[in-house]
Image: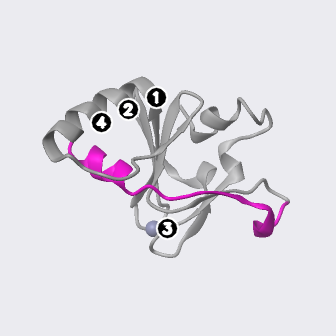
Amino acid sequence: MRLADAFVVDRDWISDGDFVVTCTCGQEQRLDAMTLDEGSDLTVYDCTRCENSLVGIMTDGAATDLWLSISAMTRSQGSQGHRVNGYLVGSKVDIALQPSGTGLDDAELLLGTPNFFFALRDL
Ligand SMILES: [Zn+2]
């Protein structure tokens, strides 16, 4: 599973290399360069420099199971991610959708949802 899987329904040209994040450590990177931690229901992208987990994607079904069990324990509030075409996407920082060859001015932003990782921490 890749972040691009959630967006390829609307944009058939897309790949992980079209997403850019800037880590809290200042490292700007495209997703296809990041370190992947892949599970069956969840993929996490780690910063190439500080190994901070920045971006995650999971299936909607797995997310629902997770949030149900988490919210019962913590009653956490706030946005835990973006639901996109059957996936849940979460990120500590904003994700810019910036196809190579275009400028940052043309980028679409997916706002950061840090609560995604607060929940995962309890797994
Ligand atoms: Zn970093």
Of the two numbered discs 3 and 2 on the same chain, state the one appearing first in sequence.
3
Residue stretch in magenta: 102-123
Q: Does dot 4 land on a helix, a strand or a loop?
A: helix
Q: Which residue is mark 2?
A: 63
Say whether residue 105 is magenta. Answer: yes
Marks 1 and 4, the one that precedes in the sequence: 1
Above or below residue 111? Residue 23 is: below
Crowding near the residue tagged with mark 1, few <14, some 14–19, many ≥20 C-alpha atoms within 10 Å: many
Viewer-nearest of labels 3 and 1? 1
Q: Is mark 3 within 8 Å of ligand 1?
A: yes
Q: Quadrant of residue 12?
A: top right
- Circles 4 and 2, Cβ within 8 Å, touching? The answer is yes
> Do callouts 1 and 2 mark residues in contact (Cβ within 8 Å)?
yes
| Residue that extends furthest to the bottom in the rendered view of this protein | 26
Identify the residue at image location x=30%, y=36%. Answer: 67
Q: Nearer the viewer, residue 95 or 33?
A: 95
Mark 1–mark 2 distance (CA, rounded to whole Å): 6 Å
Residue identified by numbered label 4: 67
- Colouring style: one colour
What's the residue type where badge 3 is placed? Cys
Assign the C terminus to one quadrant of the image.
Answer: top left
Distance CA(mark 1)–CA(mark 4): 12 Å
Relative image position of residue 74 (x, y in whole percent) = 17, 47
CA separation, marks 3 and 1? 24 Å
Residue assigned mark 3: 23
Estimate the spatial distance between the alpha carbons at disc 4 and disc 3, rounded to whole Å: 25 Å
Of the image marks 4 and 3, the number of the one nearer the N terminus = 3
